[in-house]
Amino acid sequence: MIRSLMRVVILGSMLLPAAASGTKTVSATTDSPAMESVTMEPLRSNGMPLPLPKPDLALIYPAEPVDIEIPLPRPDLAAILPRATRTVTEMFQQQTGGVTGDEATWRLKSGEGLATLLQRAGFKRADAAAAIDAVIGRASLRALPVGLEVRAARDGFAFTTRNGRDLYAIRDPEEGWIAFTAIRPVERYLAYAQGVIDDSIYRAASANNIPDPALAEYIRVMGFSVDFQREIRSGDAFELLYEQQIDQITGDIIATDLHYAGLMLSGTQLGYYRYDHDGSRVGWYDREGQSAARTLIRTPISGARLSSSYGMRRHPISGYNSMHRGVDFAAPTGTPIIAAGSGVITEAGWYGSYGRYIRIRHNSTYDTAYAHMSRIARGIRPGARIEQGQIIGYVGSTGRSTGPHLHYEILVNNRKVNPLTVSLPTGERIPPELIGGFRTKVELVEAEMLATGNLRFAAIDLLPSEGGVQRAP
Ligand SMILES: [Zn+2]
């Protein structure tokens, strides 16, 4: 029902620009002949050769004057430093052409220094001292953490330093003990996933092994426009493109980033692209550069059930029919309630039948109100400025209430409206000076998704059942 595809992306600069320029990509689900040559080797983005089995020692001793021309003004360390290997034995063989062995892993004990550990691992005292002499200057040996794993063989050892590099010391048959840093092989994978939602987005996502951080970001971004508990219908479909960085030695996932979030909602297509503003701030925008962020969130509580909607109803306490000018979300007492948008607190305290109550003025048009709280969060008082998503209080059953729930109101020009249907203004557009860079990013994301061979929503007749998504012919 759900199809996902992983593609290897090169090690190097930002996700997509390099990937689009003719670098090798590997599809793990096609059965093309290229499959035979699929390897986990990272590809070089700058065309520099892989390190030779025995590199020029001048490159290993950058502190010594060297006779060679460094090819780039600011060389890419990944191109100069060797790649870490799974074992010290492998590295020894690569660097010296020789053979060593007896490799084992030792853990640094409390109060122990590297020299003691090496002697425990079978090094003679003089050898350990010479090896440590070579290491000093490349890594601080004072602050090694207890429990540090040191891989030691007869003629060398290695450990991972705090900056994520590996430090090796090996006994070169000609040069004696040398120490050097190696880059851990981290590969970037792009994964595209799409699927039809039968009941919940969570179930559909977990059926497809979409990683939690990617799903959480997807829900956050889409949550501005969509109420996942109320608006999703069987047959709606999602798609996303995410990237993972994976350490090829340990298999650890180092980072997960969502790049595209798409949703086909009762025939309406929503799609948002991640854009990094000069590395300091991440924004989400539709194709036209309109922000995914709304000024207000429709459901300012998570994990709650809509227990009473807006409109005429028989009041549960008075028994009279009356207009319910808000929505109720049932949730356990103590469930955090967040500010639906940034703004200024205008009320925070007891407010008659509303019990503990907060009202926020977001701008000259919009206010929101929250009632029946068990507790108001610290620092929430009239005049306080708050940010969207900030916790303002906790679910309770104070005032005229039959059980723990949040009563939530949106007010437009002081008139209460239906929070679930009122059309809300969008957030800011992408700044004009960034629109060029943003369009490039959109094209690259689209090209990546196209390259997976999957038909996109726009062109597909989605079926809500086992038939699922069709493969491109
Ligand atoms: Zn209510």
Image (cartoon, rainbow, N blue to C red):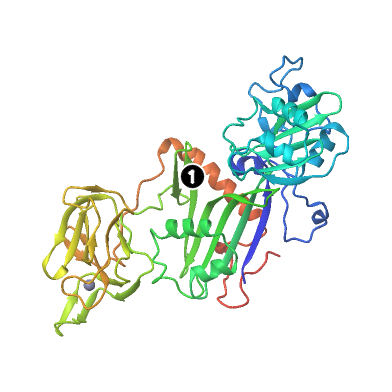
**Looking at the image, which is closer to me, 39 or 427?**
39
Ligand 1 located in image quadrant: bottom left
- Residue that appears at 20% across and 59% down: 358
* Image vertical order of residue 27 relative to residue 208, above or below: above
- Residue that appears at 86% across and 24% down: 174
State the image quarter where residue 3 is shown: bottom right
**Looking at the image, which is closer to me, 129 or 55?**
129
**Looking at the image, which is closer to me, 213 or 414?**
213
Q: Residues within 10 Å of mark 1 (few under 14, many from 20)?
A: many
For label 1, the residue is: 275
State the image quarter where residue 193 is shown: bottom right
Residue 158, position as x, y percentages in the image: 71, 38
Residue 466, position as x, y percentages in the image: 61, 77
Residue type pointed to by label 1: Tyr
Whether residue 183 is visible to the viewer of this picture, yes or no, is no
- Residue that appears at 71% across and 30% down: 180
Q: For the C terminus, give its image quadrant.
A: bottom right
State the image quarter where residue 398 is shown: bottom left
Q: For the N terminus, give its image quadrant.
A: bottom right
Whether residue 265 is visible to the viewer of this picture, yes or no, is yes
Q: How many circles with numbers are drawn on the protein? A: 1
Residue 66, position as x, y percentages in the image: 74, 16
* Image vertical order of residue 369 relative to residue 21, above or below: below
207 to the left or right of 294: right
